[in-house]
Amino acid sequence: MSVWDDLVGQERVSAQLEAAARDADALVTAVAADAPVPEASKMTHAWLFTGPPGAGRTQAARAFAAALQCVSPDRALGGAPGCGFCDGCHTALIGTHADVSTVAAVGTQILADDMRDTVRKSFTSPANGRWQVILVEDAERLNEKSANAVLKAVEEPAPRTVWLLCAPSIEDVLPTIRSRCRHLNLSTPSVAAVTDMLIRREGIDPEVAAAAARATQGHVDRARRLATDPAARERRAAVLKLPLRVADVGGALKAAQELVDAAAEDAKQLAEEMDGKETEELKAALGAQGGRLPRGTAGVIKDLEDKQKRRRTRTQRDSLDLALTDLTAFYRDVLALQLGSRVALANTDAEDALERIARESSPESTLRRIEAIAACRDALDRNVAPLLAVEAMTMALRAG
């Protein structure tokens, strides 16, 4: 087992990162021994991981971070960094390593305030690890100010600081930033590769694993969730019934309300799990006693509450976007049936509904429905009220 094992279908990327981790290890070892630094190196100070949703760009970046912090004694015997078991690998993978900082969008943007402490930390030497690693999960959500702060740090990094930026595509990142990064593009894993991972790594029944991989079309995280969470399967089943419920205005509006309510409930459940724990941990760190906070710390709690509110909004929109992705896949299957395509259907568990919609509509109307879903996603990205955006979509699905 190694840190690269969870990178499903990314053998080329894994090989490149492993080679860079070897050179990075040689560099740190040489500096520590006051020996000559290797001249040729595959290691660089900034990396940009791109790829479609589900390809595993964040997992690849985190695996690389773990390999950079690997302290396995096997390295000294010629083994590759990234054993997956040592303290450096383990803490980097689970997000508790002192020298691996992760930045993710809480709301729709990564604000300059969210980056300030991280950028400052990037100019310091590692506390006890081999590298200071900054992992930005949603680099496409950097706004102008936060992107400029990252640019300045990437332009003049500390000697042992590494930036790992993740984004859907290279165009989502400022040209001035991406020009200073080594680019790695990940591809969507095959359904077979994801199925094998679910069986081998998660112990999932082969039929359930194959159905989850096929339904998510190679999206690793969604496939894992669908295979392991019955509630996720129930939510997806409800979404796939929506096309049959929008025959009239009342049905379309009711379906929209239920879709938005389900997303809000998802966000609420996640908030209940995360917010309470975060708040209690912060209060303990501030030295609260008997429920009373020390004087002057109320502002810190207020900042956390604002952050949690922004995260709830994003979580609701992400849940809606997931439902819209499933809906798009449904109509893609409808279109495949209408055109007589040999493309494998993603939603074989809804084949009766697919065939009915395919018989009762034309390819042109199916394309218009797919466009209506895309328009809804665009509206949500522009912060249109979720119910208004989804109602407009369901009415368009009704009209065809």
Image: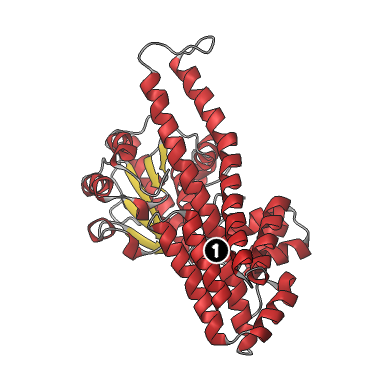
Residue 253, given in percent of the width and then of the height, sits at 58, 62
Disc 1 residue type? Leu
Residue 226, given in percent of the width and then of the height, sits at 67, 57
Task: State the residue at coordinates (32%, 50%).
Answer: 142
Is residue 154 placed above or below 394 in the rendered structure?
Answer: above
Q: Find numbered disc 1 in the image and state the secondary structure of the residue it sits on.
A: helix
Residue 19, given in percent of the width and then of the height, sits at 43, 57
Which corner quadrant holds the C terminus? bottom right
Is residue 369 placed above or below 110 in the rendered structure?
Answer: below
Whether residue 213 sits left or right of residue 182 in the image: it is right
Residue most extreme to the bottom: 340
Q: Quarter of the image holding residue 239?
A: bottom right
Pick whichever, 377 or 98, lies toward us.
377
Q: Is residue 251 visible?
A: yes
Whether residue 397 sits left or right of residue 201 in the image: it is left
Pick whichever, 104 or 125, lies toward us.
104
Judging from the image, the colouring scheme is secondary structure
Task: State the residue at coordinates (27%, 41%).
Answer: 159
Task: State the residue at coordinates (62%, 71%).
Answer: 248
Residue on which the image places disc 1? 324
Is residue 69 placed above or below 289 in the rendered structure?
Answer: below
Whether residue 173 sits left or right of residue 106 in the image: it is left
Residue 135, given in percent of the width and then of the height, sits at 40, 46
* Mark 1 residue crowding within 10 angstroms, few (<14) / some (14–19) / many (20+): many
Pick whichever, 192 or 367, lies toward us.
367
Q: Is residue 196 visible?
A: no
Numbered disc total: 1
